[in-house]
Image (cartoon, rainbow, N blue to C red):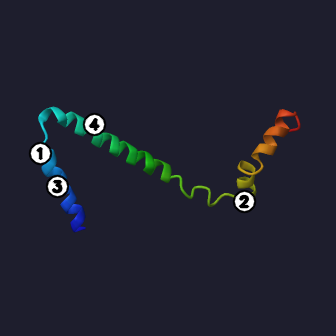
Amino acid sequence: MLKEREIRTKILRRVEKISTDKLDDIWEFLRKIEKNSRKKDDILSYAGCWKDLDKNLIDDLTINLGTKRIEEDRGGI
């Protein structure tokens, strides 16, 4: 945990020394990092959402999907 605190302190010190005209660039960079982090969290929130589904339904949505689409194209279903 000390390492994290040291890194944060170093970052703050460096930001304080940066010229005013570069602050907007740093702000945008931080916003992009936060946005990417939120995207990752949104994607990971779906992890495990299929765990309670019936195996036959999962097979229909994955393994059997190609076959079913071919049959539908041929007018079989």
Mark positioned earlier in the residue sequence (3 or 1): 3
Check disc 2 and report the residue beneath it. Answer: 55
The secondary structure type at the circle numbered 1 is helix
Contact (Cβ within 8 Å) of mark 3 with mark 4 = no
Query: Which sits in the foreground, 17 or 51?
Result: 17
Rounded to the nearest angstrom, the CA distance separating label 3 from label 1 is 10 Å
Question: Is disc 4 placed on a helix, strand or loop?
Answer: helix
Cα separation between marks 3 and 4 = 19 Å
Sequence-first tag of 2 and 3: 3
Q: Quadrant of the C terminus?
A: top right
Count of numbered marks: 4
The quadrant in which the N terminus is found is bottom left
Which residue is painted at 75% across and 50% down in the image? 60
Q: What residue type is labelled 1?
A: Glu
Q: How far apart are marks 2 and 3 (CA)?
A: 52 Å
Q: Is residue 54 above or below residue 14?
A: below
| Secondary structure state at the residue bearing disc 2 | helix
Residue picked out by circle 4: 28
Q: Which of 1 and 45 is in front in this view?
A: 1
